[in-house]
Amino acid sequence: MTIGILYLCFYPIELEPVARKTPPFPGLKGVYAPNNKLVKTKLIPLPSPGGESIVRDSSGQFYTGLANGDILRFDAEGNEQTIIANTKGRPLGMKFAPNGELIIADQKMGLISLDSSLNIRTLVRHYKNEKLEFVDDLTISKEGIVYFSNATQRNPEVVENEAWEQRASGALFAYNLNTEKLELLKDELFFANGLALNEDESYFLFSETFGLTLKKYWLKGPKKGTIELFNNALPGYPDNITFNNGIFWVAIPSQRAVDIEPLFEQPFLRAVLLRLPESIRNAVIPKRYAMLIGYDENGRVIYNLQDPGGKYDYITSVLNVENRLYLGSLKEPTMGIYKLRDLHFNASFLEKPTEN
């Protein structure tokens, strides 16, 4: 018994947990009230799991990156699937640059590009001679500035350590495709993840997944270079963000682990948990649950789409094209296509009884 207590209290571990207060939990109520809308998502099989992000080119073709490194091209219905390249890494976020190149945030290979001849070129792999461990997502301005995130500098195979330790190691960067200049915009972020420019490109919205926040980074005007809170009362962990027709689409891959959030203010107790078998720690991982939120530029919830049963689980990206949402998942062997019933309903609609 004594040996067991000593082990749980004092056995050395790699992490050094610190205290940090968790942002407020709004609960699944009001504008976040549960519904079954995403049950209607059409699932399209993929040749390999993990189509984390989806993007469309100027000719109407779609692309996603799979867990095995493949870049897959397909049509608007998810058919005519063709593997066009392999990054030899783990492609995550991707966007098309003004010059037509596909710019890819690859967890293992860094920021890379795929040109029309299907040649892959490394753009950014290091910052100040230090390898970027988890290049995650990006957004690109009309001038060819790539704003991208490096989620964490910890072991990229155990991303949960960012939450267990509560020591921020993520960062935001700007890379100019024309001058090849790299600039650090902000470091010490809690798993910096999705980014999306607004319509006039005066700012981009970004998520801190384990920080449970959405923030604005101002690029123009009197607030240029500053960060402003957009929302820190989120129902789940935010991932990739896209912008279309005045809406920021935020993917919510997982519900919040509300039961253990009080422990984030108790570093000693978290250290004890970290000495327990991984199977016990994994018991706190939330169950399957599908959710995505659409916000307007004022932070008002316009769309609240859910499936408590998690038919299509761990949604990591949302691409709005006309009246459809193309859904990506880091884990699923399929991608999702959800047809929006109405492009213009507002938050008042969400207060009405759920329509299944």
Image: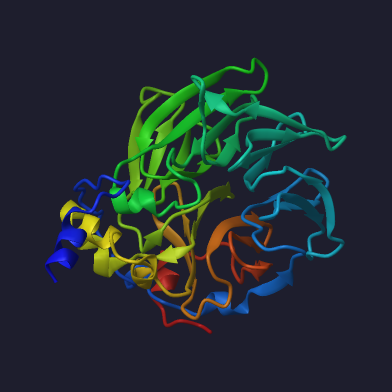
**Which residue shows up at 43% across the image and 26% down it?**
185
Q: Is residue 332 visible?
A: yes
Which quadrant of the structure image shows residue 140?
top right
**78 left or right, relative to 283:** right
Q: Is residue 342 above or below residue 240?
A: below
**How many numbered discs?**
0
Residue 170 image point, x, y percent: 41, 38
Residue 50 image point, x, y percent: 64, 60
Which quadrant of the structure image shows residue 347?
bottom left
**Which residue shows up at 55% across the image and 63% down it?**
315
Q: Is residue 77 above or below residue 64?
A: below
Taking depth in this image into account, of 2 and 177 the one nearest to the observer is: 2
Residue furthest toward the left? 2
Identify the colour scheme used: rainbow
Q: Is residue 213 above or below residue 217?
A: below
**70 left or right, relative to 170:** right
**137 left or right, relative to 69:** left
Taking depth in this image into account, of 165 and 91 the one nearest to the observer is: 165
Residue 335 image point, x, y percent: 67, 65
- Looking at the rendering, in which quadrant would you find the N terminus? bottom left
Taking depth in this image into account, of 216 and 170 the one nearest to the observer is: 170
**119 left or right, relative to 2:** right
Residue 232 image point, x, y percent: 31, 51
Q: Is residue 212 visible?
A: no
**Which residue shows up at 44% across the image and 55% down it?**
238
